[in-house]
Image (tube, helix red, strand yellow):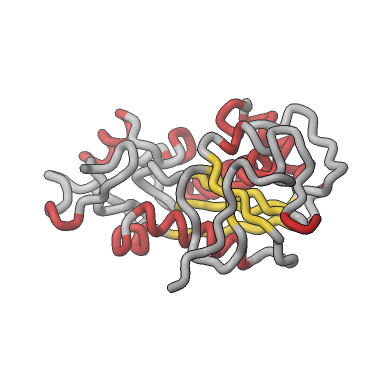
């Protein structure tokens, strides 16, 4: 497969921390971010968001720096103001089959594919490009630097939090509504008592008694076996 077009961070005309969301030639760019890749349960959720140049979203920043109430308020405003936005998911069986990094990239690809407009530039949080034939810029810490990525981080996080609250009702006893699938002490204790549910990631440490077989272990990200 041909590598996606890459654009360096020093190229002229690219959006900066507070600049417009225009891509090459004046086309709009899409910010892309994910939520839930380090969790033991539930999907990894990616969002893609294209903001208008005249967006009005006071306090927009990385979703992790916001209170839940502020995230929800901003998510509604983002959805109403965005030129386009979309979500992409990858669930446990796919994560276990191809690993969390590849599943995260696929969820990002699905989010971009779901946009009703084709962006001129993809602005991706982190350091990994995705397998789509579009110009791309990866930005480490972009969720705190580039408004379109901040918006995507909020859409991904708020959707996933609501989903995990719903999944808590379907799979009671694990406390999913509280920890959202992360590997807290309470979550690990519930796994010891109950065993994994159908939405748990079986290749992640702590999910199965004794851990997964060595050749199934996930790598690359915090909270995952190396």
Q: Observer-nearest residue: 201 or 125?
A: 125
Residue positioned most to the right: 54
**Viewer-proximal residue, 214 or 7?**
7
Left-right relation of 198 to 112: left
Query: Residue 190 falls in which quadrant of the image?
Result: top left
Most foreground residue, 8 or 147:
8
Q: Quadrant of the N terminus?
A: bottom left
Pinpoint residue 213: horizontal percent, then vertical percent: 13, 54
Left or right: residue 179 compared with residue 162: left
Above-or-below relation of 218 to 114: above
Q: Quadrant of residue 10?
A: top right
Residue 93 location in percent, x, y? 34, 62
Tell me the residue at 53%/57% (across/down): 108
Q: Position of residue 102 (x, y in %)?
A: 38, 58
The mark total stands at: 0
Residue drawn 38% across the image and 42% down it: 38
């Amino acid at each position: 497969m041909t590598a996606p077009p890459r654009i360096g961070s020093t190229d002229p005309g690219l959006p900066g921390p507070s600049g417009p969301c225009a891509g090459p030639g004046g086309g709009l760019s899409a910010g892309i971010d994910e939520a839930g890749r380090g969790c033991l349960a539930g999907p990894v959720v990616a969002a893609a968001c294209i903001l208008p140049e005249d967006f009005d979203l006071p306090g927009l920043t990385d979703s992790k720096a916001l209170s839940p109430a502020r995230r929800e308020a901003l998510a509604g405003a983002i959805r109403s103001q965005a030129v386009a936005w979309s979500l992409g998911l990858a669930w446990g069986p796919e994560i276990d089959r191809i690993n969390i990094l590849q599943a995260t990239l696929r969820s990002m690809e699905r989010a971009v594919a779901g946009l009703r407009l084709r962006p001129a530039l993809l602005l991706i949080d982190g350091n990994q490009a995705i397998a789509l034939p579009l110009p791309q810029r990866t930005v480490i810490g972009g969720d705190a630097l580039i408004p379109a990525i901040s918006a995507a981080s909020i859409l991904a996080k708020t959707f996933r939090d609501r989903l995990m609250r719903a999944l808590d009702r379907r799979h009671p006893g694990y406390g999913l509504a509280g920890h959202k699938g992360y590997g807290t002490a309470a979550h690990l204790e519930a796994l010891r008592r109950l065993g994994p549910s159908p939405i748990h990631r079986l290749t992640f440490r702590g999910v199965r008694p004794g851990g997964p077989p060595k050749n199934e272990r996930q790598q690359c990200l915090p909270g995952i076996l190396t």
